[in-house]
Image (tube, coloured by chain):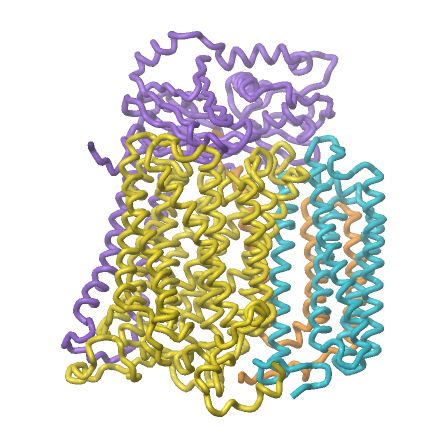
Amino acid sequence: MTFPLFPEQASLGAREVDYVMLWLIGISCFFLLVTAGPIAFFCFRYRRGNQVNRVHIRKGALALEFTWTIIPIFVALGLFGLGASAYFRQRHPPEEAMELHVVGKQWMWKIQHPEGKREINELHLPEGVAVKLLMTSEDVIHSFFVPSFRVKQDVLPGRYTTIWMVPSKPGSYHLFCAEFCGTSHSRMIGRVTIMPRAEYQAWLLTGEQGESPVAAGARLFRELGCTGCHVGSPAVHAPNLNGLFGSVVPLEGGTTTLADERYLRDSIMLPNLQIVHGYEALMPSYQGKVSEEELMAVITYLKTLGSGKRGERIGGPGSAGAVEAGGEAARVQPLHLDMRTPAPAVVQPDGAPAAGGPAKGGTPP
Amino acid sequence: MKTDKRASIAAHPSVVIYLKVWGALMVLLLLTIGIAHFDLGDWSVAVALLIAGVKALLILLFFMHLRYDRREVLVFAGAAYLWLMILIIGTLHDYLSRNWLPRL
Amino acid sequence: MNHSELTQPVDLPARENDSYLAKHTVRSWLLTTDHKRIAILYLLSILFFFLIAAIAAAIIRIELVTPQEDLIGADMYNRMFTLHGVLMVWFFLIPAAPTVLGNFILPLMLGARDVAFPRLNLLSWYLFITGGMVSLYAILVGGVDTGWTFYTPYSTTFTNGHLVTMVAGVFIAGFSSILSGLNFIITTHKLRAPGLTWFRLPLFVWGLYATSIILVLATPVLAMVLVLIAAERLWGIGIFDPAKGGDPVLFQHLFWFYSHPAVYIMILPGMGVVSELIPCFARKRIFGYKFVAAASVAIAVFSFLVWGHHMFVSSQSVYAGFMFSILSYMVAVPSAIKVFNWTATLYKGSISFDTPMLYALGFIGLFTMGGLTGLFVAAIAVDVHVTDTYFIVAHFHYIMVGGMVLGFMGGLHFWWPKITGRMYPEAIGRLAALVTFIGFNLTFFPQFVMGYLGMPRRYQVYPEEFQFYHILSSAGASILGVGYLLPVIYFIWSLKHGPRAPDNPWSATGLEWTTASPPPVHNFHQIPVVVEEAYQYPVPASPPLEAALPGKSQKGEPL
Amino acid sequence: MKVEGQPLHSHFETLQQQENASTLGMWVFIATEVLFFGVIFTAYVYLRWEYPAAVRAGSLHLEIVLGSINTAVLLTSSFIMATAVLMAEAGRRRLASLLAAITAAMGVAFLVIKGTEYSMVIAHGFFPGAGGGPVPGREELFFWLYFLMTGLHALHVFIGVGLLSGVAFFLRRPRGVSVNAVRNIGLYWHFVDLVWVFLFPLLYLASHR
């Protein structure tokens, strides 16, 4: 019966977190030594009745107080730096990571692969491939937690949250729900299985082939009647959706917003919430007509629309040409392995949005 | 017992001062309503709160005797609004900085 | 009692009938405005709630011995840990030290006859009892299964528990905290004895003052958040419901704005007690008085800036995470300063290991462990891994049980002679302290290891590999249970059979030791005048003098 | 040692110390009220940041005229209350009682105007649960906040009116109420007015007319 102190390191990120953890354990042992040590010694040496020299001239102790205020401050800043830098890398998925969709529902995880395969409480991943999970919840707040990846992220209803990792060690690991979500919170668990890439490709072909999200998105795009207005019909005046994702959309009233997953979701479910500049509020709301999975499929399909160049809007009257996004998202080589240097896809934060007024919506971290 | 050095009875407001303060408050009220008719975009909130702040200060200093009371009362009153600012700014700075991440 | 009886000085201090415990009519207890009697009323009521919450903890620990569900059902398990959380936080940890030790000792330490607003003090107790009864009713008719944090949207739309009744109970009890905090602030400002300037105040008073600042400024926010949850659950207003434009994270912001300062409400009085015990039992002046006092107030103020570290994984923005992480590290520095100053106080002291001193040393050890693991969870990368796991459960139990409960027990033992006029049995007291220390560590240290291995919080059914740690923890819990029971037994025993306590059994400094034990109804026959610094323990001149001191600590005559 | 209308409690040494203590205590209570209202203001700030359009649209439906009159009523009542406290301190208890009664009357006037305003807003169909407005939920949330904020404030005005009428009645009797209590109730009334000073622009003037 082995007693591991650390769970297995099944992803590249896990090593970094354990590195920070070791630093913290070291510094804590140092501080414990600096306090418990002297206390034990003083208690032994200066116990009452022990004949020992107790003459103590009370001189000012400002220097001592100063040292044990400044040193903890610097140690604290160092620890902050360690923790924050690892966290910052953890929250920046590379551009071309393989995107899976996760929907948390009361007491189960529904996962869909880009190739269409669906799983419940099971997650099969290829080894060495950067994977990004786009997650939402159908009811309460859950939290996607894989101890071996040292990764956890709350899954909120009505919003998209993402995590990413690079699985590195084949094997089978735990998947937990970490945010209390009701009666069977402790049964909302699953297995994450990491397989070598070849084995993963073979696994994809076994079992029933689900429709890939992009194909399902295209199908729904037609069935729900989106093509009626958005595909260049002269009769209806609707914004062009090519290259929409990632661009900055000018809104009614002079403000602009970033077209990310949340904007796409809000535009489908609550079209009158943010009306594009130069258009009327004609679009019907699809609230309740579209399930979370179908919504994710349509959004994935919308992302593939457009001429493949990000940040540049074609057409769309009155949008005064493409409003250049904060920074051009450079291309990145497909399978990025080394976590140490973040993928060049990392763009400086947009900072102030392109046009005046507060940019709202925008991608959740 | 602890002697209170600065008796608060010495500098005492009079009805005349109160009348002037009341007049100022009425003028500021009219100003607030007037300003609302112009569209200053995002600045309309800032201006409205500024005027409300001035009105609040007038009430606090004169009607609530802060100007004539001992310093510790001033600290207690100030602390309340400082903590309110901590609550509002602490919550808002999370919503403000949610869009600063580069696009996924 | 009318005024004439008070003003002329009472000449001969008749010991027996003069004590505040003299009258025993029901009316004298239930309508008392004497801060000492209200402290005892609070002591009995918090013990009652502590008992219920401890039973819930025992049931949870027994259930967790096996990885599958056998003792109680999943829903009952959720209600158990919610009950344990709500009752412990709002009906034991937050009220205990301020209202029991604070109410009794603060006026005595300040040389005052009572708190600033005695009737408000009694109202505070009645609000506490009413809130307690409403919460108890909510538990008896079915309880709540959302956890003590009431996270939305589960608490507002999906739970079928009696949330609104429980929230109403906590709402009422919140006002009891506000009134106590208000009372202590005004008493400290206005009712100090002549000559007792701010920097001559005992450090327990500083600790209470800092606690009262938090009590007064944080609890109203909790009250309003609870109103918002109840409103959302009853009328569906949608401020926390994403479908209607609300945001569950907004609830978490407002809830933790109160709940993090609340954990400092729990620990600051404990720190104050330790700052009293260490100098007394080491016979040495506190090291760096001004720094320890300033650290208390600094903790109180800083504690309001750091609440976001509870929400690193709740889709809070990355930059807000950085801001809260830095501020969380800064709030740890004053606590470190306090621990260093206690350590320095022991240097060249004459240390005797009476029961209060054992609890104080236990406090320093366990609070340092809890504080250091606080550094772990402030580093965002590690917190992402350990939040909502047993690492967090162990961290806050080290602070709450290792810190607050040990501090409270130390204070209770230290002032027991003053409160009841009786001495507790010393030998069994030390035994209980050791049993509590051992039981506590065996219960909660394995949870650190289990937490980092990934054992999630609030799980009734868990994977087999964690069972070993759960068995250790449950074994420790039973020892801890014994550690808690022993003091209750020998305190009750000491009421009848304990030896009579002299006015100053520990020959400690502080105005509370200058009056009789138990003190007369109006605390002091003449209001004392303070002329010197706090903790004037005489500097031991040279070794030969030490020899004259009797070995045992039971010194009758003051040093 | 009883001063006229001012019993000295047993544990205070001087009357001055007791008055300072109660004033300080009142200010601490006002601090808790500031934070109690602060939570709802934070919720308003959140809504205004996330959905400014809904707040602007909602604000257009409010009765700005009645709101302005109410603000004027409260500011004036604050002035009269301040004068009442002045008179009580100067010992002219009957005049102070009269002024306190006027303040209470203005408080009632405020509540009446607020009642008519509520009925008009509800008559226009903009009450919570009506689901009005282009975007389901957002504007309705504005109205929930509007009713919660002004409702909580109206409750405080109602309590204030009760206290003020009590003060007006007991000031007539020689040892009815201490000057200290009048000063504290004055502080409370000014605080209630202070909250409305912030409520009015944020709710009623959120959008330009």
Residue C343 in the image, given as x and y percentages of width and height: 27, 66
Of residue C75 and residue C401, the one placed in the foreground of this image is C75
State whether residue C453 is above or below residue C478: above
Picture colour for chain B? orange
User: Which chain shows up in purple?
Assistant: A
Instruction: Name which residue lies at 68% across and 12% down.
Output: A228
Residue C381 visible in image: no
State whether residue D109 is above or below residue C156: below
Instruction: Name which residue lies at 67% across and 26% down.
Output: A271
Instruction: Name which residue lies at 31% across and 39% down.
Output: C470
State whether residue B69 is above or below residue C237: below
Instruction: Name which residue lies at 32% across and 67% down.
Output: C356
Residue A109 in the image, given as x and y percentages of width and height: 46, 24
Of residue C135 and residue C171, the one placed in the foreground of this image is C135
State whether residue C473 is above or below residue C293: above
Instruction: Tell me how many marks there are.
Output: 0
Of residue C243 and residue C280, the one placed in the foreground of this image is C280
Picture colour for chain C? yellow
Residue C444 in the image, given as x and y percentages of width and height: 32, 47
Picture colour for chain D? cyan
Q: Is residue A66 left or right of residue C150?
A: left
Residue C173 visible in image: yes
Residue C264 in the image, given as x and y percentages of width and height: 44, 57
